[in-house]
């Protein structure tokens, strides 16, 4: 509050100053009066019956010749401040007496609800209906032309008590967003009331004293349900020494520590911090650390950044700071797909990594301090999505919704996916009746010829596929047995009788064509050497009795080099938690 004093003091001015202090103590209007400029002098011409007048730039001119109690002055000052807070002073309505009267009635209703001061007798009376909304009351007053409701103005004879004047500009004060300030003071007052009811003692104005980073974090907790649950589980670390020691230019997240590190030295606006914090929350919510596998951490971080930044741009969450990774050509792709694209130019994109995911040590999940944070993050983002959609809180990209749903749903078992793979490649055979061979029931009725059901030999001829097995000592025996058992049962169920099998560890061992039912019990570990699968693929590719169109199943523990599959239809079966050291072209079924 900036008070322009006159020389000396008098009882009228003392009552005015006490009234100002009463308003300052109010949690709702206190922050507003601190930004206003109050004048109790003759700088603005006043009639004897006038109280005060307010201008659009926060200047409040009180009638220094008025004699009133501090409670009455508190009421009048609150009246002027609410005109600013509610955005009543508009250039297009300046000087409109009906608009002024409508706003005066709304302010009078607010003051009655807030219990601020005591209304002077001249400003009290019965209010018209519909005093909760200015535009509705404005139209009603225009239709009824009832002058009985024009006496709530703080200027006598119903004259306008607010005006669009930029007098304050010559005082060189910064402009104030009065509506935003009022909203923040209301939120702060409500939070303090809830804390007080819960036994937590907080000081008024705490929200205004927050930094821009803290206010951005508070916005997610109070106004953005999609990420509010995730935000509540992470502590904000803004200690300059900690951030400097960790070499964090803007922000980073440590999921296993449940902390987000932010650098106040980045000098971002509150909207930019909202974007940055939402970026970090999505890293946690979408389990990017758990999905790393055996990928390069820096390149994986870059791929995830591209996806998240595109989504946040589409969702219009805050504003994206300059220098973040963004490429419209990658829109609609998953992080895994983008990683495969970036892997073609590994050195270039690794230099672009901003290192905002602080990966946990590899043995952390085995420690006694481990908790399933991934499950908690998945639950938090799923509940946030449900609330966001039920309340219609704004646009969400389809790719983000699909990822959230995919994380929240239990994964499809690998053997079910393998069965679908078989269904796509081996359609059911149609049986045909033939008299070339009699039915088994012919002996019961020898006088009646009965045809038998037979498959076409040409249809059965091409129903085969290859199996390349990693039989080195590093491959888990039980998992290998489960894979072979599934392959054998699915082959028999789809009338695939013969399968070409090659075992591989340090060298290939051709087993030739085998009956599908015999595959499960025929594997032997040979040599316990390293895994070299390319010679086995070469063997099948050049085998004269193995069709170029026959698909190939490769079972490996991922400890192999890049493979040349010659464009052959293929799929990988690998243990869960492992990742191929090269981008796979065919589907990958993770066993376990």
Image (cartoon, rainbow, N blue to C red):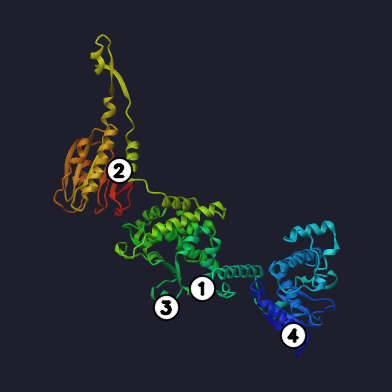
List the residue tagged with mark 2.
570
Q: Earlier in the sequence, mark 2 or mark 1?
A: 1
Q: CA distance from mark 2 to mark 1?
A: 52 Å
Q: Earlier in the sequence, mark 4 or mark 2?
A: 4
Q: Quadrant of the N terminus?
A: bottom right
Q: CA distance from mark 4 to mark 2?
A: 89 Å
Q: Earlier in the sequence, mark 1 or mark 4?
A: 4
List the residue tagged with mark 1.
267
Mark in front: 2 vs 3: 3
| Residue at the bottom extreme of this rendering | 8
Q: Is residue 432 above or below residue 261?
A: above
Q: Secondary structure at mark 4?
A: helix
Q: Position of residue 319 (x, y in %)?
A: 54, 63
Q: Give yes or no for contact between labels 2 and 3 (Cβ–Cβ under 8 Å).
A: no
Q: Earlier in the sequence, mark 2 or mark 3?
A: 3
Which residue is at the front of the view, 205 or 118? 118
Mark in front: 4 vs 3: 4
Q: Give yes or no for contact between labels 4 and 2 (Cβ–Cβ under 8 Å).
A: no
Q: CA distance from mark 1 to mark 3?
A: 16 Å
Q: Give yes or no for contact between labels 2 and 1 (Cβ–Cβ under 8 Å).
A: no
Give the class, few, some or many, for how many residues have Cα within 10 Å of label 3's Cα (few <14, many ≥20). Answer: few
The reply, left or right, for residue 154 in relation to residue 196 is right
Q: Secondary structure at mark 3?
A: helix
List the residue tagged with mark 4.
14
Q: CA distance from mark 1 to mark 4?
A: 43 Å
């Amino acid at each position: 509050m900036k008070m322009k004093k006159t020389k000396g003091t008098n009882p009228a001015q003392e009552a005015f100053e006490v009234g100002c202090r009463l308003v300052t103590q109010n949690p709702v209007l206190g922050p507003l009066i601190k930004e206003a400029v109050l004048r109790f002098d003759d700088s603005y011409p006043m009639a004897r019956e006038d109280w005060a007048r307010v201008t659009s730039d926060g200047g409040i001119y009180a009638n220094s010749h008025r004699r009133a109690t501090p409670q009455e002055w508190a009421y009048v000052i609150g009246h002027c401040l609410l005109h600013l807070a509610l955005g009543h002073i508009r250039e297009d309505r300046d000087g409109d007496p009906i608009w002024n009267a409508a706003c005066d009635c709304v302010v009078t209703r607010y003051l009655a609800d807030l219990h601020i001061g005591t209304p002077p007798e001249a400003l009290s009376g019965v209010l018209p209906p519909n005093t909760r909304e200015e535009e509705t009351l404005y139209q009603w007053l225009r239709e009824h032309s009832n002058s009985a409701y024009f006496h709530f103005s703080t200027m006598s004879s119903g004259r306008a008590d607010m005006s669009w004047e930029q007098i304050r500009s010559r005082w060189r004060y910064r402009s104030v967003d009065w509506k935003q300030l009022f909203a923040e003071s209301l939120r702060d007052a409500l939070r303090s009331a809830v804390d007080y009811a819960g036994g937590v003692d907080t000081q008024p104005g705490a929200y205004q004293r927050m930094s821009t980073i803290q206010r951005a974090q508070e916005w997610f907790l109070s106004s953005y349900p999609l990420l509010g649950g995730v935000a509540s589980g992470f502590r904000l670390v803004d200690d300059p020494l900690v951030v400097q020691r960790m070499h964090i230019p803007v922000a980073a997240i440590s999921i296993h520590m449940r902390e987000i590190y932010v650098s106040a030295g980045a000098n971002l606006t509150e909207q930019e911090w909202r974007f940055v914090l939402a970026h970090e929350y999505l890293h946690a919510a979408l389990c990017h650390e758990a999905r790393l596998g055996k990928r390069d951490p820096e390149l994986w971080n870059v791929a995830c950044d591209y996806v998240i930044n595109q989504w946040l741009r589409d969702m219009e969450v805050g504003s994206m700071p300059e220098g973040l990774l963004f490429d419209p050509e990658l829109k609609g792709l998953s992080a895994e797909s983008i990683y495969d694209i970036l892997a073609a130019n590994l050195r270039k994109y690794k230099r672009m990594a901003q290192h905002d995911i602080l990966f946990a040590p590899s043995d952390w999940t085995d420690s006694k301090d481990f908790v399933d944070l991934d499950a908690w993050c998945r639950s938090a983002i799923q509940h946030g999505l449900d609330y966001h959609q039920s309340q219609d809180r704004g646009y969400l990209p389809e790719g983000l919704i699909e990822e959230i749903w995919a994380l929240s749903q239990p994964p499809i078992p690998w053997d079910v996916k393998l069965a679908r793979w078989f269904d796509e490649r081996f359609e059911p055979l149609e049986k045909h009746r033939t008299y070339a061979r009699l039915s088994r029931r012919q002996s019961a009725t020898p006088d009646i010829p009965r045809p038998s059901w037979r498959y076409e030999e040409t249809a059965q001829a091409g129903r085969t596929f290859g199996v390349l097995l990693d039989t080195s000592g590093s491959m888990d025996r039980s998992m290998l047995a489960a894979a072979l058992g599934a392959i054998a049962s699915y082959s028999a169920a789809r009338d695939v009788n013969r399968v070409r099998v090659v075992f591989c560890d340090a060298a290939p061992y051709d087993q030739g064509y085998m009956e599908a039912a015999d595959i499960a019990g025929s594997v032997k570990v040979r040599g316990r050497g390293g895994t070299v699968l390319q010679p086995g693929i070469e063997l099948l590719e050049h085998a004269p009795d193995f069709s170029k169109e026959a698909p190939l199943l490769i079972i490996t523990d991922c400890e192999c080099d890049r493979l040349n599959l010659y464009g052959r239809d293929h799929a990988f079966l690998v243990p869960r938690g492992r990742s191929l050291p090269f981008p796979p072209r065919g589907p990958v079924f993770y066993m376990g």
